Image (cartoon, rainbow, N blue to C red):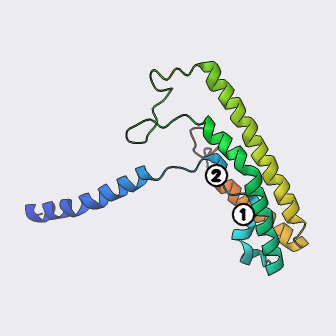
Amino acid sequence: MKPHLFMLGLLLSVPAFAEATSSTTQAAPRPPHERKSQVQMLLEHRQDLALTDTQAASLERIQAALDTKNAPLKQSLEALRPPRPPGDGTRPQGPPPGSGTDDATRRTNREQAQGLFGQLRTNDTQAYQEAEQLLSDAQKTQARTLIQAEMAAHRPGHGGRGGPPPGE
């Protein structure tokens, strides 16, 4: 291969590689409390479920009430989050040096967060139960299937270190 063609190929590939790596570092994962509710999933699949305009409007009302109910819980969760370290946005393992956060404080914050996540799940389940009352039997069956599939797609792998179990 001629050296100038090799260099040209190398130069053309570098910007594409740099763009790919910079876009992956900027996209932060969504916090767990920012995941879609089951009612929101129904609204996103309104055509698949063949929702009537009345059903869709009622589901939007239920979703708005859920958002209002969850707002203080989400604010409390944000307050429990440790501050982001300066730099490239990646978080080092363990507490930042000199943060003064001891094990008891971290444990207390974790327990509070678990309680808040439990309340968010309870609110989501109650809203879904209210929403399901608006659906026909066929829509209920399809909605359950859609929600289970979407939740399974976003569930972390159960094979350790986030990967799927062997054989999948």
Between discs 1 and 2, the one toward the N terminus: 2
Q: Quadrant of residue 13?
A: bottom left
* Residue 159 in sight here: no
What residue do we see at 77% from left, 52% from top?
A: 69
Q: Nearer the viewer, residue 84 or 51?
A: 84
Q: Is residue 34 left or right of residue 101?
A: right
Rounded to the nearest whole Å, what is the CA distance between mark 1 and mark 2? 12 Å
Residue 125, compared with residue 106, is above or below; it is below
Q: Nearer the viewer, residue 10 or 71?
A: 71
Position of residue 4 measured from the top left corner of the image (x, y, whole percent): 9, 63
What residue do we see at 40% from left, 56% from top?
A: 23
Q: Is residue 89 left or right of residue 118?
A: left
What residue do we see at 84% from left, 67% from top?
A: 141
CA neighbours of label 2 inside 10 A, class few (<14), some (14 to 19), many (20+): few
Q: Quadrant of residue 60?
A: bottom right
Position of residue 158 measured from the top left corner of the image (x, y, whole percent): 65, 42
Position of residue 117 measured from the top left corner of the image (x, y, whole percent): 72, 42
What residue do we see at 60% from left, 20% from top?
A: 103
Dot 2 amino acid type: Glu
Q: Is residue 147 left or right of residue 105?
A: right
Residue 33, compared with residue 81, is above or below; it is below
Q: Is residue 2 left or right of residue 131?
A: left
Dot 1 amino acid type: Gln
Residue identifier under label 2: 34
